[in-house]
Amino acid sequence: MTNEAVLKFRAEREKIALACRIMAMEGIVEATLGHISMRVGENLMLIRSRGPEDCGLFFATPEEICLFDFSGNPKEADRGFSKPVELPLHGETLRNRPEANVVLHAHPPAVLLAALSDLDLRPSFGAFNIPAALLAADGIPVFPRSVLILNTEVALDMLDSLGSHKACVLKGHGITVIGDSVEQTLLRALNLNTIAKVALEVAQAGGEIAGIPDQDLDMLPDLGGNFNDIGGWRYYLAKLRRAGFDKW
């Protein structure tokens, strides 16, 4: 790949870097742990990588987003960045879920605690947060191993747990979330964190989530990507801008 390829994907790299910063701002990642990948061609993906002076996701830059094939082979000139050790999580997910264009891996503390407490992340609310309710209704499976997704074998085991769902909890580890766009995938990850926070707080208050009736779930409208995903993205981007972290 030439410098022209790097320039070609500049907008995609910027969006991934901004999403990384939003993840950190909202507390679903800490320090240097967590990645977002994006499909940009047949067997090609952009993914946040690490340089010798990596300062973490809150300070992610477009230059840290590097081009690899799904097997982890670099597809652009070496710029001093190393691929993530869990690249197989991203590469195998994109390879085996062709409808997914983006994969997000994060370590939200609320999801970690909810999974370790064996709390069921079922639909516990409705109109309070419709996208989160619908995500929970779709089902959020649990991958029971707390290992790093370092190779194809473990990645395929995780994908067996994910199945046809949009999100999977990695017990004792984090989450894997897929989507059509960076905006959609980011919002799904944040909504998964909301589901887990509610479950934790209900349990801490001594309550038990019974779930909401199917007839109420059926009445929840899908407000569409422009409202849920693009609108949410604009909100978090504005919040990032107000904090002064939207510039390189």
Image (tube, rainbow, N blue to C red):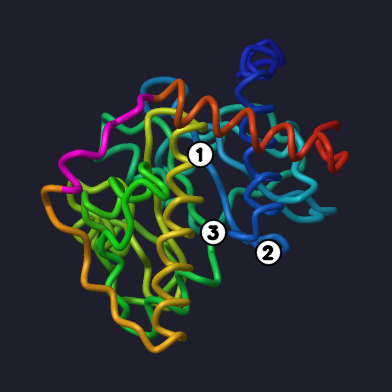
Q: Is residue 45 visible?
A: no
Could you say which quadrant of the image residue 213 lies in? bottom left
Question: Which residue carries the number 2 mark?
Answer: 30
Marks 2 and 1 close (CB-CB < 8 Å): no
Q: What's the amino acid at mark 2? A: Glu
Going by the numbered disc 1, the residue's amino acid type is Ser
Residue at image coords 33%, 33% = 100
Q: Residues within 10 Å of mark 3 (few under 14, many from 20)?
A: some
Question: Residues under labels 2 and 1: Cα distance?
Answer: 18 Å
- Residue 209, x across and y down, in percent: 28, 74
Quarter residue 218 falls in = top left
Q: Which residue is under mark 3?
A: 85
Q: Using the image as rendered, state which of residue 19 and residue 2 is in the foreground.
A: 19
Residue bearing the label numbered 1 = 37
For residue 56, which quarter of the picture? bottom right
- Residue 26 in view in this figure: yes
Residue at (28, 68) in percent of width and height: 142
Q: Which residues are magenta?
A: 216-224
Q: Earlier in the sequence, mark 2 or mark 1?
A: 2
User: In percent of the image, x 63 and y 28: which residue is there?
Assistant: 234
User: In this picture, is 124 found above or below 9?
Assistant: below
Give the quarter of the figure containing the C terminus.
Answer: top right
Marks 3/2 in contact by CB < 8 Å: the verdict is no
